[in-house]
Structure formats: structure tokens, C-alpha cells
Image (cartoon, rainbow, N blue to C red):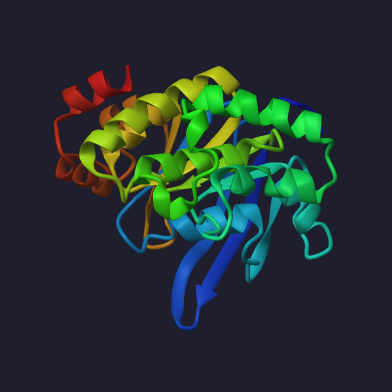
Amino acid sequence: MSSAGPVFELRAVAKKFGPTRAVHRIDLAIPPGRSTLLIGPSGCGKSTLLRLMIGLIKPDAGDVRFEGAAITPQNVLTLRRRMGYVIQDGGLFPHLTARGNVTLMARYLGQREHDVQARLDELVELTRFPPDALERYPAQLSGGQRQRVSLMRALMLDPQALLLDEPLAALDPMIRSELQTDLRRIFQTLKKTVVMVTHDMGEAAYFGDVIVLMRAGSVVQRGALEDLIDSPADPFVSKFINAQRGSAAWLRETAR
């Protein structure tokens, strides 16, 4: 596949949970090397879309492709090793230290100890995680530190894509602001394909090269922040933006 092609491609993807339609026939291409932010009201399907991309759930219709390959039960575990995944509460194993959580998959795959340690050193520096906290267990870490461990774990195998599901939502405002700054620096440094779910338009403006606004399981509009503000595809777009904290001018300033 050409490097110019989409990293993820969803073709007429649909998903229901019982009678609830979570995703309705979505076509979506995620460009390489950019940050795509999925945003919308609670229950709009954005987290479901992310889980479909990483193969945690299967679509009822349509297909999901990663770097040109359809994600199937036969290849999903292999493909998932090329994706990093960060969830809201970190999802760390409580019985493992920070070091153990970060290096678990690398050791499972039989990587050499020297290489594992070298990669861990790189990630500690990248995420600004205190090295002396590597031997602590998740319960002994702050919320911000747990998210840094989760991020290091997601990046340990140097994945082609990084997927994050509201990674900052559970943090208090000061820690969240600090992590936002660090995350954007990390995204810009690594230049990886990033797909991130958020419910905050300010956060979407801050991180997003591309913003995908969803409602009721469908994509209402996809584009840059300027597109959503200046050329809304539907009255819902303007209504959603105006309901968020701050004005359009504030959002433009946030995105810089």
C-alpha cells in the first residue's frame, strides 16, 4: 500500500448493540501522520468507532481496513501490535509495576532485554515520567503518572498508529492541562497517525489536524476546525460548537 493512502479506512461500517444503533453506515478514511479527533455528544458512537478501528469489536456490516488490510479474526492480534491504545483510566494491571506494565508485550514477544531497556529509557524521557517511579505499582502513582505509563505502554512497540479514548477526561484541570501540553508535543515529535476521542471542542481544536463531528452514530462533518466554524455542513455543527466553552475566536486561538 502507498504511504499516501489512509491508515484506517471504514467502508459502510455499521454496529448495533441490541436495539441500539451505535454506528450507522460510516465511510471514513484516517490520513497518515496526522491527528484525527472524534468528537460529539455522549452516545454518538465515537468510542465505538475507535474500538472498531482497533478490532476490539466486529462491525455488523461493512469492513475496517488498517494499512490496506481488512481486519479479520484471523489477523486482528497481529495487526493490533502495530497500534497503540490508551483508554480513559489507563487500564493498567494493578499487580505489575509501572516498568512491568510498559514492557509486558515486548517481553512476551521475546525482545532482547537490552533493547527493551533502551526503548523504556526513550519513552521515560519522551513522556517526562520520573524514572524512580518505574518500580511503583499503579495504586502508588498519581492519575497523571498512570496515564503517562499507559501512553508508554501504547508506544513500547513503536506502533504505526496511536488510538486514545478520552485519555484526559478523568484528570483534574491542572494535571489535564499539563498532560495536554505534553501530549501535543509528543504527537508533533513522533509524527504518528493519531486517532483520539474527546467530548471537549477545545481539546479537539488543540490536538486535531482533522476533526470528525458525530451525532447519533453518523458523521455530520469532517474537516479542519476552520471548516466546521466557517462552513458548517448542518445546523447541528454550529449548535455543538456554540454550546462548548468559549467562542469561535477562542477555539481558533486554542488551535494555534
Residue 81 showing in the rendered view: no
- Left or right: where 117 falls relative to 169: right
- In the image, farthest residue toward the bottom: 18
- Left or right: where 205 falls relative to 245: right
- Estimate the x, y position of residue 57 in percent, counting from the top left: 62, 66
- Left or right: where 151 falls relative to 20: right
* Residue drawn at the location 77% of the way across and 57% of the way down: 77
- Estimate the x, y position of residue 225 in percent, counting from the top left: 34, 29
* Residue drawn at the location 66% of the way across and 58% of the way down: 55
Residue 100 showing in the rendered view: yes
- Which image quadrant is residue 83 in? top right
Q: Nearer the viewer, residue 117 or 195?
A: 117
Q: Is residue 185 above or below residue 140?
A: above
- Estimate the x, y position of residue 215 in percent, counting from the top left: 36, 56
Q: Nearer the viewer, residue 110 or 189?
A: 110
- Which image quadrant is residue 103 in? top right
- Left or right: where 162 falls relative to 64: left
Q: Nearer the viewer, residue 218 or 120?
A: 120
* Residue drawn at the location 54% of the way across and 18% of the way down: 189
For the N terminus, the image quarter is top right
For the C terminus, the image quarter is top left
Q: Is residue 171 above or below residue 71?
A: above
Total numbered badges shown on the rendered structure = 0
- Estimate the x, y position of residue 241 in percent, counting from the top left: 22, 40
